Image (spheres, rainbow, N blue to C red):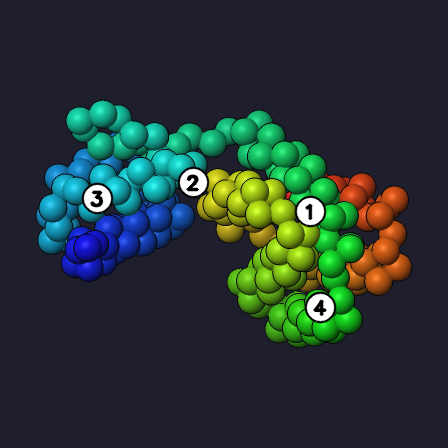
Amino acid sequence: MEDIRYTTKSKLAYEVLKQRIETQYYRQGDSIVISTVAKEINASAIPIREAMKKLETEGYLKIIPHKGALVTRFSEEHIAEIIEIRAVLEGLATKKAIKNIGDKDIQNLNELIGCMDASIESQDILEFRKLNRQFHTMIYIASKGERLCDMIFQLWEMSDWAYKKMQESPEIMRKSNQEHREIVRMLIEKNEENIEQYVRAHKLKLKDK
């Protein structure tokens, strides 16, 4: 039977380390020592190692055997490559979703677009990003491609910290949401011929932010 206390400490370590990386408390290339983190959160080394392993799979850390971990250094080229891969996979997932999207899904997608409009007017970037993620997640899950979705979501994790530092103006967000409307229109029309390339182009615009 799994030790609940161990699981809780591992989750705590994961959240603490991830937050510190995303807020740049730990900067790219910094060394994170297991014993130091263990003392800070009053835990043994085991849950710290487990948290670091998970963060390594998400691209945040590189494990150094018997020592700890280094915060991953991401160059602009590395981020651009991740975005390019995402564009291909997300375009494919959207195309595959066409066969499974129903009227209720379309209604929910349009409601999310309306909520994004409101977040743009209030200049709530964090809310816009959350809703944007929900919008695309709903479509990709409808693709019924479990492994495809897993790859997409893992790539999201790998590029999330960099994406969160991007600054979006209301103009950029409005343009993005207009493209969301076009994606929904293509889903309604079952436009498999054009939707894949359209979503690829939509995603590749992340490289310009």
- Kindly state the secondary structure of the residue where label 3 is placed: helix
Circle nearer the N terminus (3, 1): 3
Alpha carbon separation for disc pair 2 and 1: 21 Å
- Amino acid type shown at disc 2: Glu
Q: Which residue is mark 2?
A: 58
Residue 162 visible within the image: no
Left or right of 27? Residue 147 is right
The x and y percentages for residue 164 are 51, 51
Q: Earlier in the sequence, mark 1 or mark 4?
A: 1
Task: Measure the C-alpha gap from mark 1 to mark 4.
Answer: 15 Å
Q: Quadrant of the C terminus?
A: top right
Between circles 3 and 4, the one closer to the viewer is 4
For mark 4, give the secondary structure: helix
Q: Which residue is mark 1?
A: 93
- Residue under the image location 36 percent in, 41 percent down: 55
Quarter residue 123 falls in: bottom right
Residue with the mark numbered 4: 105
Describe the element under mark 1 as helix, strand or loop: helix
- State the residue in front, 81 or 11: 11
| Quarter where residue 32 is shown | top left
In this rendering, does residue 112 appear at all? yes
Sequence order check, earlier mark of 2 and 1: 2
Q: CA distance from mark 3 to mark 1?
A: 35 Å
In the image, 50 versus 82, the foreground residue is 50
Which of disc 4 and disc 3 is earlier in sequence? 3
Query: For the residues carrying marks 4 and 2, which lies nearer the camera in this image?
Result: 4
Residue type beneath disc 1: Ala
The percent position of residue 60, horizontal first and vertical second, equals 39, 38
Residue 86 in percent (x, y) is at 63, 39
Q: CA distance from mark 4 to mark 2?
A: 29 Å
Decide if residue 164 is on the left or right side of residue 40.
right
Residue identified by numbered label 3: 48
